[in-house]
Image (cartoon, rainbow, N blue to C red):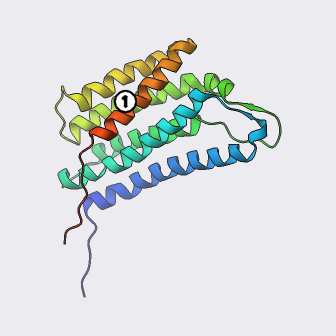
Amino acid sequence: MITMQMSPFEFITIFCSLILGLALTHIFRAVSDLYEIRERVTTYWLNSLWVITVTMWSVFTWWGLWTLSLDMDTWNYGQYWFLVMNLSSIYFFTTLVLPKATDEGDIDLETHYYSVHKAFFSVVAFSLFTSAIINYSLFGQPLIGPMTIMPCIVGCAAIGGVFLESKAYHKGIGVFMFIMFIAFQLSDNIVINYTI
């Protein structure tokens, strides 16, 4: 009888995948629910851009977890906890980006965006700063390099989103982060192979 033992990567990523899967499920469900009541929803382009950005963020993070299968033979609880906290932040800001569909009344997505922006950008900043630490400590990226410096720079911009009420700033940071995620995805060179 052949028994298969779960690798550390498989064990760790089961829960990580669950968190990211829930984030994607939430965003897809929220978009679908709001579409069903679209006659009562006033859309806002910046909010829609963030929906695309957080979806890309979740998918790209899930894809990036593959690198852990190549580099991490052993894990400790601190590493695992830190990774779960980072992934949980992605779930939390994903739940904030769109409001719940309601049975009655109008929904204005611009009003929603500015009502949650402090919490949203606080969680986004936390996610970016912890991403820099994870890129250094788990993925072996240089302490001063694009995968550690860029998340910190973008994290500082997110902190601005917490404290600044300027609509021009929020529009600028929304476009900036969207472009950053496009750039991160285009620069990705991970190839997943199946070998026996």
Q: Position of residue 121 (x, y in %)?
A: 49, 25
Picture quarter with the C terminus = bottom left
* Residue found at the very far right of the displayed protein: 104
Location of residue 30 (image quadrant): top right
Q: Position of residue 143 (x, y in %)?
A: 18, 28
Residue placed under numbered mark 1 in the picture: 180
What residue lies at 39% left-to-right and 39% top-to-bottom?
A: 86
What residue lies at 28% left-to-right and 67% top-to-bottom?
A: 6
Q: Is residue 178 above or below residue 19?
A: above
What residue lies at 78% left-to-right and 37% top-to-bottom?
A: 40
What residue lies at 57% left-to-right and 24% top-to-bottom?
A: 117
Q: Nearer the viewer, residue 133 or 178?
A: 178
- Amino acid found under the numbered disc labelled 1: Met
| Left-right relation of 193 to 110 | left
Picture quarter with the N terminus = bottom left
| Left-right relation of 75 to 58 | left
* Residue found at the very far bottom of the displayed protein: 1
Visible residue check, residue 9:
yes
Q: Residues within 10 Å of mark 1 (few under 14, many from 20)?
A: some
Q: Position of residue 24 (x, y in %)?
A: 51, 48
Visible residue check, residue 162:
no
Of helix, strand and loop, which one carries label 1?
Answer: helix
Q: Position of residue 61 (x, y in %)?
A: 37, 44
> How many marks do you count on the picture?
1
Location of residue 13 (image quadrant): bottom left
